[in-house]
Amino acid sequence: MKKDEKILLEKHKDIARIDQDIKRTHGWYVRVRYMGKTHSKFFSDRKCGGRYSSLLAALAWRDKTESKLGKQRTDKHIVTISNSKTGVVGVRHNTKLNRFEVSWVTSSGKQGKTSVSINRHGNEKAFEMACKIRKEKEAERLAEG
């Protein structure tokens, strides 16, 4: 298999193939999501000189856009918006048990969890520790594989 055939068959994060014969639309659609905003662009086969050329243009635009936004280039999923009231992804405050709970996804795709006691460390120190653990675990996942 030639290099250009191989790259066409691979899956590329944030890039989708669109082939609509009725609308005569053929190309690659790129969608980069970061910090709650979506940046997107369509790369037409006709305008870029073919299916392979349009894919290369789409890949280059995705990588350049991620770099410009400060998003780390990885094919792994990254969450950038927190649903918890702490404002930190993967760190939540459990008021009933008076602790900060930390969660992450391991490199094997399993859920990792731990907690930091507010009674033992105080609110501010416990929150700092929880955030540090989350940051370290996310860095480990992204560094592997």
Image (spheres, grey):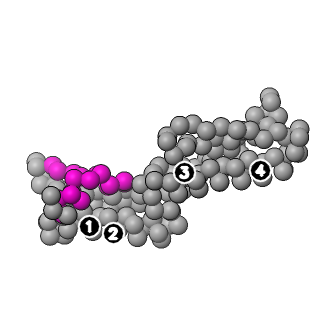
> Which percent across, then down, holds residue 36?
52, 53
- Which of label 4 and label 3 is nearer to you? 3
Q: Which residue is more in the foreground, 101 or 42?
A: 101
Disc 3 crowd rating (10 Å Cα; few below 14, some 14-19, many 20+) is: some
Is residue 132 found left or right of 79 in the rendered image?
Answer: right
Magenta residue check for 37: no
Q: Which mark is residue 56?
A: 1
Query: Pointer 3: what residue?
Result: 141
Q: Which residue is more in the foreground, 40 or 126?
A: 126
Instruction: Say if mark 1 contacts mark 3, CB within 8 Å.
Output: no
| 69, above or below 132, in the image | below
Say whether disc 4 or disc 3 marks the residue closer to the N-terminus. 4
Q: Which residue is more in the foreground, 55 or 31?
A: 55
Disc 1 crowd rating (10 Å Cα; few below 14, some 14-19, many 20+) is: some
- Range of residues picked out in magenta: 4-20
* Residue positioned 39% across, 66% down in the render: 63
Say whether disc 2 or disc 3 marks the residue closer to the N-terminus. 2
* Residue positioned 14% across, 70% down in the render: 49
Query: Pointer 4: what residue?
Result: 129
Say whether disc 2 or disc 4 marks the residue closer to the N-terminus. 2
| Residue 45 visible in the displayed image | no
The quarter of the image holding the N terminus is bottom left
* Kind of residue sitting beneath label 4: Met
Say whether disc 1 or disc 4 marks the residue closer to the N-terminus. 1
* Kind of residue sitting beneath label 2: Ala
Secondary structure of the residue carrying tag 4 is: helix
Magenta residue check for 18: yes
Secondary structure of the residue carrying tag 2 is: helix
